[in-house]
Amino acid sequence: MRDFYEVLGVSRDASADEIKHAYRKKARQLHPDYAGPESEEAFKEVSVAYEVLRDPQKRREYDMGGASAFSGAGAGDNFGFADLFEAMFGSMGFSSGMGQTRARRGQDLLRAVEITLEEVTFGVTKDIRLDTAVVCETCEGSCCAPGTSPAICSTCGGSGSIRTVQNSLLGPIQTTIACQACAGRGHTIPHPCPECAGEGRVRATRTLQIQIPAGVQDGARLRLTGEGEAGPEGGPSGDLYIEIRQKSDSRFSRQGTDLHTRITIPMTTAALGTVFSLETYDGEQEVIIPAGTQPETEIVLKGLGIGRPTGRGRGNLRIHIGVNIPDDLSADQRNVLEQLAQERGETRVPPPDSAAGPLGWLKNKFGA
Ligand SMILES: [Zn+2]
Ligand SMILES: [Zn+2]
């Protein structure tokens, strides 16, 4: 029997990842389905080496003299996997029935998705690319090389646990611990799938189309059940969470389902009224500013706001009107306004010359 490290072509201090990659490479080259029946022995050898070295516990035991314990058993014999373990670790004999596989669930994933305020307004469909674990297509999550199946764990007889009875002063104490040979699974994988190295899942990039509803809140998390990482060894998938990040918009802001924007018009326009065109998410809209519009008037365009998350109706688009009072009047413009004030009978006390300071202002104010 060759040294397991030699069989896989890795050094004795190889990491778990290096071992896995070495196995995948060898298993692909040697699998009888690809390389023909004459490679079967070599494939088995690689599978056995990997089955031991992938498991930290077994690897330790092997490093501590497992090879010599095994060397007498006849290299190149057509051994069964249980025989190998018996030779290496002592014990045990088969019993019938597989232990329950306690399938572990895949991890949840969290992805942030940026959307514009316009996309919030109408809802949007986005393609999300995920680099994640998916179920291995070769073994469909069974972890076994095609045409092979799991073997009942010979250490625990398939129960996944080891029961020991110790005698104490108070009588026998029974303890049950998870079987270390199979990590409580009740079975082992004699021929791990070459595609996924016996994990039942592989990394892949997949694209997912997600529907983001209108009216979604900034920071909200949408949960997509079962779209997370595939579980190891055929375990159920985790969930995918999509966290919404709303980009800010220079033209509109948001309050609930209402959109807000601000338009500043000249003083004369406010007094005389106007009509103008506003570019909205629903295209150009005609906005009428009636004569005599006061500063901070709100003009409401009904139903042009953000879609409600319930799917029924939309909020409003609210236009806040600011009025620009000129602070750079020419002498002529000033005269026009003075005339207007006179015409309207609007009397006023002129403000002090700014150069005159507070005292000048007092003189003006009280006519002193
Ligand atoms: Zn596989
Ligand atoms: Zn076991």
Image (cartoon, rainbow, N blue to C red):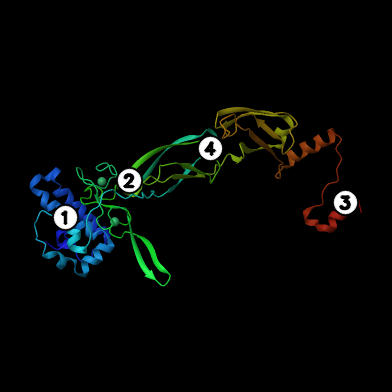
Q: Tell me the distance, in whole angstroms, between the alpha carbons under discs 2 and 4.
A: 37 Å
Tag in front: 4 or 3: 4
Left or right, 62 with reference to 36: right
Up the image or down, 76 lies above or below 244; here it is below
Dot 2 or dot 3: first in sequence order is: 2
Tag in front: 2 or 3: 2
Q: Amino acid at mark 1?
A: Val
Query: Where's the N terminus, which quadrant?
Result: bottom left
Question: What percent of the width, then of the height, locates residue 264?
Answer: 66, 38
Badge 1 marks a residue whose secondary structure is: helix
In contact (CB < 8 Å): disc 1 and disc 4: no
Across the whole image, how many numbered discs are drawn on residues? Answer: 4
Q: Quadrant of the rendered structure where residue 125 is? A: top left
Q: Residue at x 85, y 58 (%)?
A: 359
Dot 4 or dot 3: first in sequence order is: 4
Badge 2 marks a residue whose secondary structure is: helix
Q: Which residue is mark 3?
A: 365
Residue 234's disc is: 2
Badge 3 marks a residue whose secondary structure is: helix
Residue 46's disc is: 1
Q: Residue at x 23, y 53 (%)?
A: 94
Question: What percent of the width, then of the height, locates residue 170?
Answer: 43, 70
Q: Residue at x 28, y 44 (%)?
A: 136
Q: Tell me the distance, in whole angstroms, between the alpha carbons under discs 1 and 4.
A: 55 Å
In contact (CB < 8 Å): disc 2 and disc 4: no
Q: Tell me the distance, in whole angstroms, between the alpha carbons under discs 1 and 3.
A: 102 Å
Q: Amino acid at mark 3?
A: Lys
Return the residue nearer the eye: 256 or 156.
156
Badge 4 marks a residue whose secondary structure is: helix
Q: Amino acid at mark 4?
A: Val
